[in-house]
Image (cartoon, grey):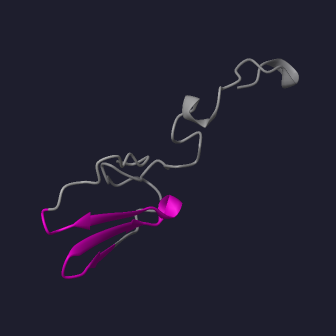
Amino acid sequence: MFGSIGEVTFRPRGPKALGLSERCLVGFNTGPPLIPSAYNNNTRIVQTPGYILLFTEMIHDARVIAMDGSPHMPKCNPPLN
């Protein structure tokens, strides 16, 4: 983002012009896919009668998966899908 001694070479036109990692929304081992990495591989899995929750330690992201076969929300577009 910066050139020589403070010279700005790139100015994004809002947050969506930046990648997810530049916006600190995902780390190097947050999903999908949830794959092992060299650091902070902790994932908590919680199961209830209707849902499964995957909670990753890195970035503290929670993915909730409905187990009743219901369709996804029609206009839901979270950063991690």
Relative to 58, residue 76 above or below = above
Q: Quadrant of residue 34?
A: bottom left
Taking the magenta stretch, the answer to whether it contains residue 68 is: yes
Left or right, 72 with reference to 79: left
Residue 62 in the image: state x and y as whole percent.
41, 65
Residue at the (22%, 66%) spot, across then down: 66
Identity of the residue furthest to the left in this view: 69
Q: Position of residue 18 (x, y in %)?
A: 57, 32
Q: Residue at x 29, y 54 (%)?
A: 73
Q: Is residue 9 left or right of residue 77?
A: right
Q: Is residue 1 magenta?
A: no
> Residue drawn at (25%, 71%), measured in percent from left and top?
52
Residue 6 point in image, percent of width and height: 86, 25
* Chain part drawn in magenta: 45-69
In which quadrant will I find the N terminus?
A: top right
Instruction: Look at the picture and state if 60 lies above or below 73.
Output: below
Q: Is residue 3 above or below residue 72?
A: above
Task: From the viewer's perspective, tell me whether residue 43 is left or right of residue 58.
Answer: left
Q: Is residue 27 above or below residue 67?
A: above
Total marks in image = 0
